[in-house]
Image: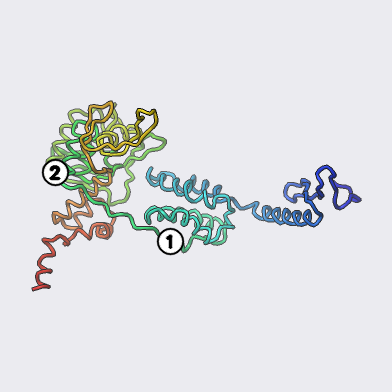
Amino acid sequence: MPRKDAPEFSYDEMTGLYCKKAKNPTTGKWVKIYGHTKAEVKDKKKDREKQWRLDASAAGCPYVHQYAATWYRLNTVGLSTKRLSDYQSAINNHICPVIGDMFMHDVTSDDALSVLEEASELSKSAQSKIVTTMKRIFEAAEDAGVIQRSPCRKLKASGAASAEKQPLTVEQQTKLIMAVKDTPAYTFVMLGLYSGLRREEILALQWDQVHLDDEPPYLSVRRALRWEKNQPIVTDELKSKASKRDIPLPAALAECLAEEALRSLGDYVIADTKGNAMSMVSYRRRVLDPITVRTARMTTRIGADGKPHEVALKVGDKVRNHPITISLDFHVTPHLLRHTYITRLILAGVNIKTVQYLAGHATVQLTLNIYTHLMENQPRDTAGAVEKAFA
């Protein structure tokens, strides 16, 4: 602590700098402030004291990254792996890198917009996930009294709309089935194409839900699987009440399941090597990898020069170190299998309410919003109207 009769400034002849001490009101510690002139020292002291006041006023307000972590911990219990991944990506990859070091009450609507500006190259769908996450975080902060008003109230996603997903053609479906016929992915693919189950519903399916001896044979959707730290958690909590449904089995799927039942080691239709529900790692190895390794793609190989090179694997190419030939020139996801199933129902003229039920959609409007473009818009449906218009 400086003496009462101490000079206002001190001068260091070695450095040629003036020095003045100032006390941090929060820590109570004295800090030395240097400058080439007395005026410079005074200006620096004012700036430092202003920052101390701001820090003191914000002492009870968390940083964005701190509050986001707290919000995530308290509000994501029991959510699906996909939803958790969406929140984690939005927070860690988009929100915190831009505004994470700001105090919650300092964030303005312009700051929120800057997050979207940094993600401007993403699709509208991807931006929507960021917007949803920010809105929920700041609305929770407003409800908790951490901030007076959320800066994200009017925030909207921009970006280009996601490209419309094209269902697999009949030829592609046949190629896919033949490609994975003798792999653990076969039954999963058949369930996706011929029952339209969601991934979490397929992985949770147990033999007590498969009724092969009934007429007609059918399966009951009653359970869903999610992962927590790679481990499977099977629950009867489905995506919505409409997800609980009974689905008739086409002959091809009934035959596939009958064969699988003879080989099964446990309660689960899609299981690991011991007959148990699949972990995330097991799912990737037994379901995804057999499809991916047979799909045309870019890969990296070490060339004759000892350096890595990008190499295109095409249909007909042999897979190195595997007795496998590339046979698929299209990308496959679990959702694409489901999308193909629903599309086939609609193109076959199945009543839209029946499609809604079999798909497990919460409302018929959801089904219509996604698949209206397929209904009565095929040439055979529109030809009459066109001929009449140009008669």
Residue reaching furthest left? 391
Q: Is residue 42 above or below residue 325?
A: below
Q: Quadrant of the N terminus?
A: top right
Disc 1 element: loop
Residue reaching furthest right? 5
Q: Name the amino acid type tagged 2.
A: Pro
* 47 relative to 126 in the view: left or right: right
Q: Nearer the viewer, residue 307 or 35?
A: 307
Residue 235: x and y, percent?
34, 40
Q: Earlier in the sequence, mark 1 or mark 2?
A: 1
Name the residue tied to disc 1: 156
Disc 2 element: loop
Mark 2, Cα crowd under 10 Å, few <14 / some 14-19 / many 20+, is: few
Residue 166: x and y, percent?
24, 51
Residue 257: x and y, percent?
17, 35
Mark 1, Cα crowd under 10 Å, few <14 / some 14-19 / many 20+, is: some
Identify the residue shown where x is 54% and y is 52%. 99
Q: Quadrant of the C terminus?
A: bottom left
Label placed on residue 286: none
Q: Are marks 1 and 2 in contact (CB under 8 Å)?
A: no
Mark whose residue sits in front, 1 or 2: 1
Identify the residue shown where x is 12% and y is 41%. 251
Name the residue tied to disc 2: 250
Q: CA distance from mark 1 to mark 2?
A: 43 Å
* 74 relative to 363 in the view: left or right: right
Q: Name the amino acid type tagged 1.
A: Lys
Identify the residue shown where x is 44% and y is 46%. 89
* 373 relative to 95 in the view: left or right: left
Count of numbered labels shown in the rendering? 2
Residue 101: x and y, percent?
58, 50
Residue reaching furthest front? 305
* 348 relative to 305 in the view: left or right: left
